Image: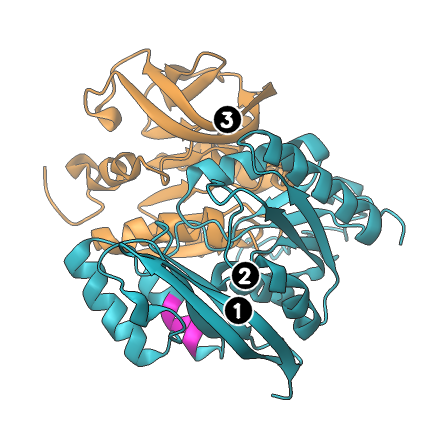
Chain colours: A cyan, B orange
Amino acid sequence: MGIVQAAPPAGQTPPPPVFGAAAGVIVPNTRSLTMKLGVLFSGGKDSLFVCWKAMQQEEVACLITIVSRNPESYMFHTPNIHLAALQAEAAGLPLVEVETAGEKEEELLDLKRALIAAREQYGIEGVVTGAILSVYQATRVQRICHELGLWCFNPLWLADQEPYMEELIDAGFRVIIVGVFSSPFDDSWLGREIDRRTLDELRTIAEKYHVTLTGEGGEFETFVIDAPFFTHRIAIEETSKVYRNHNGVLQIGRARLAEK
Amino acid sequence: MILVIDLCYRDGSLSRAEFVAPVERILREAGVPFTTRHHTAIGAPEREGADAVILCGTALRDTGYMERPELFRWLTAFERPVLGISSGMRALAAAFGGGSEPCCEIGMTEIRMLAPDPLFGGREVFSAYTVHEHAVQVPDGFVALAASERCVQAIRHRSLPLYGLLFHPEVRNEWIIERFIDNPHRGLTGRTG
């Protein structure tokens, strides 16, 4: 697929302005074409939620995954990232996957490489991220997008945690916890689905232990097994838990697509 | 009533949640009534009903609002408090004849005050989140209030309560927006001085 250049409003032929005499309102001439976007994708709830949001406004052309070999990666480490391709298939979207050694600044070059590949293969004009609070992450993605002339969207930026989690559940996302990295989460949390009952418990924990309701502070990691735009759901067939000292991961050994 | 103005490329755009919703949240939490309109949909009723205006920012590549300067000319006769944030500062400055020049800053930046102003409550240095490709040339009738190492970061009209901030106060500096809406002289929250 060829490169599709971004079409900023400057490049469009605007309709003639119409002046509403009564109210003094000027009829909009703003951008009407949809943009092709790539979504930075970890397999967790935030990236798939913003993908869903982006689909409502623009065209999501591909998902973009950075697979880090460094478990300490600030930007990209995620349990079960090896299942990103299965999730992309469930979403009916192509996946651009780039591996990184996960060295602190090197991985940003790998991200840049992934965005260039996404632009070349799918003509993306912009990037969507699931950043909520992390200025560190948002800044780095913004800088790379700026270098490449890509738009950058952060639809969850500074989002209220409570309405976000409510909307996630109401919209039909099915999300399980696959990593816990802080007290008081014990191994019973691994594999739990974030439904209304779990959300109530998370709410209590968030208040008592001053952790974020969304896990944005790195307290827990999630994996999406179904989303409103998935054509299939993910059926998990084999898992194993590794847990010690309030740190644990649910490794998904085998999973497949299943009818919804 | 505060009129919050969305400068993004389309009404209800994908950028709205990033640049408008955080400002709305601060107003909501402060209990201040507000209404939000896209910059292409501001008519006489919106202008006349507004006690103050907040012009929100846009994505880095989103500069469509600059192609319609006539949409912001009413600000020169508004005379009530205005807070222009990032792109909003650029639109405010442009309405008063101020140009802009390339200056890219992305990330946390140190802001130093150049002149005291009640909006900043005596703070002299603070760190702020910036996402911009252009800086504003201070228009006639305005003074520079603060700057980073690279460019002017805050301006105020010499006689009217019109402010422009190049950084994003809604990120880690919510106190500035709270001071803007709380100032009893502005009467926005129904309090008296």
Label 2, label 3: how far apart the Cα atoms are: 49 Å
Q: CA distance from mark 2 to mark 1?
A: 6 Å
> Viewer-proximal residue, A67 or A238?
A238
Q: In the drawing, does residue A116 fall left or right of residue A129? A: right
Percent x, y for residue A50?
54, 60
Front in this rendered view, residue A142 or B1 = A142
Q: Chain of mark 1?
A: A
Label 2 close to label 1 by CB (< 8 Å) = yes
User: Around disc 3, counting alpha carbons within 10 Å, would you say few (fewer than 14), some (14 to 19), or many (20 or more)?
Assistant: many
Image: magenta residue range: A165-169
Direction from residue A128 to residue B181 in the image, left or right = left
Classify residue A188 by image quadrant.
bottom left
Label 2 amino acid? Asn
The residue wearing badge 1 is A252
Q: Which residue is mark 2?
A: A80
Instruction: Please determine whether, in this image, residue B147 is positioned above or below residue A7.
Output: above
At 64% across and 88% down in the image, what residue appears? A259
Q: Nearer the viewer, residue B83 or A43?
A: A43
Residue at 33 percent across and 15 percent down: it is B112
Can I make out residue A35 in this image? no
Q: Which residue is mark 3?
A: B93
